Amino acid sequence: MMWPRIINANWIVGTWGLQNMKTNIIYSFFEKLRGTEILKIYEHLKKTEKYTREQLDKYQFEKLHKLLLHVKDNVPFYIDYFKKNNLSIHDFKSLNDINLLPVIEKKTMREMFKSGEIISKNKDTFNPIPNQTGGSTGIPLQLLIGGQARNFQGAAVLRYYDWMGGYCLGDQKFAVLWGDMRVKSLKERLSDELKMVLTKRRAYSCFAMDKALIASHHKKLLRFDPEFLRGYAFAVYLLAQFQRENSVNSKLSFKAVSTTTEKITMKQRQVIEEEFGCKTFDQYGCGEILMIAGECAAHDGMHVTEEHVIVETNENNEFIITDLDNYAMPFLRYKNGDMGEVSDEPCQCGMAHKRIKNLTGRVDDTIILKNGKVINSSFFAVLFEYMENVSAFQVYYYNSKKMDINIVPDVGFDTGDEKYIRDKVLMAFGQNQAFTLNFVNEINQAKNGKTKFVNICKAS
């Protein structure tokens, strides 16, 4: 093993400040161990976050142009596509010309991975590692993530932590509520364990979050006393709700909480912030492209990491995402199944980066009725968003004759709330829709710890 070279102390002080010297040394150690350049990219992103809209557009186009030069010569699918459509690199004169490329669905990407059509012929040049998404439809997507893509997403996460209040790796304790089912090599496991110790991080499983596990996590977190908490949104909410409902001798509090993966209601965010005495910062990413957007201190949407991705939306508000850094297995105009709104209005924080202001749901959660009417999961998100007397919900749709709507009622839930839910559901689905409103104590979680709030099921 090659041990990291001692880095210049003057460089540390000049770029990070004395208070971050320990952070820099720790990160430099893992950079050498894993062959990454996250610190270098982080410093780059701290400069580009001050870019104007014009500078960001120019920056993105230059990266897109460079990526296109690569794919037209090295990725079988795009070699063929350029030839069949008589396309030249000179046809791409601005960001708008990205429309000359096809939108690729997840199913197509899955098939092209198997055939090798979407994998670069010189993939090994980019130090790729294999990964796969969880697969909300039950079919995971296998992929390769190149080194540059990993560097940019890692650096973007560090910058996001700055927006949260300046978490310093190794100087402050950091707890994670997560569900990681990846099979890791011995080197990866040892590296992760060492990193946890040196960076003062601890992970707590959110698989099967029943009351016993939540109580156990609460006690362990009190002993650990972290300053920051990050985790699946609903798992963090369950922890906050446990603290609120139980007479615990001591209460958890944090400088900031980072939530991701699942959309939660304003009421649930309110519970988290009141119980933990801090602001909640939302973050969005996907397994294929990793870090996509993060919330700043203005709390008015999530800033897109435009140095790393281009986020488009179509007429149905479906995301079409381009990863500007994954040269091993390019994701160009990839429809990842998520839906939302993207705004380019100026943010109070001063950043010109576009923002995702309304992450509404997944295309996979769309319910299509017999009469052809389409109802997306966002209907339920909006329905329960402002219901103060509902802590959580979960929907299981089978057909027009069967739908289960499970809700965790809060104190004060009454017949008026129940009538409101029934009226809105019948208005959307039609008067012939049969459904049962069930009052439950908890919401079911998937095996990986994530929580799927709208489930399309086959009728038994």
Image (spheres, rainbow, N blue to C red):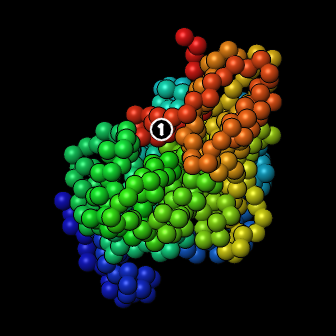
Mark 1 element type: loop
Relative placement, left or right, of 111 versus 430 is left
Which residue appears at 72% of the width and 69% of the height?
A: 347
| Camera-side residue of 276 and 325 | 276
Q: Residues within 10 Å of mark 1 (few under 14, many from 20)?
A: few
| Quadrant assignment, res 390 | top right
Q: Name the residue beneath numbered marker 1.
A: 441
- Image spot of residue 366 (x, y percent): 68, 30
Quadrant assignment for the N terminus: bottom left
Q: Is residue 92 left or right of residue 266?
A: right
Q: Quadrant of residue 75?
A: top right
Residue extending furthest toward the top: 460
Let me know if residue 298 appears in the view: yes
Left or right side of 79 for 424: right
- Is 233 in front, or is 142? 233
Tag 1: residue type? Asn
Farthest residue to the left: give it.
1
Q: Quadrant of the C terminus?
A: top right
Instruction: Tell me if 373 is positioned left or right of 254 in this view.
Output: right
Q: Is residue 294 above or below residue 212?
A: below
Query: Where 110 falls versus 173 (above or below)?
Result: above
Q: Position of residue 180 (x, y in %)?
A: 37, 44
Q: Nearer the viewer, residue 154 or 256?
A: 256
Is residue 103 among the parts visible in the rendering? no
- Across and down, in percent, residue 24 comes to 35, 75
Of the pair 336 and 240, the residue shown nearer to us: 240
Say which residue appears at 47% left-offset and 30% top-offset: 140
Which residue is painted at 43% across and 81% down in the image?
16
Residue 11 horizontal/vertical position (percent): 39, 84
Give the residue at x 58% y 75%: 47
Q: How many marks?
A: 1
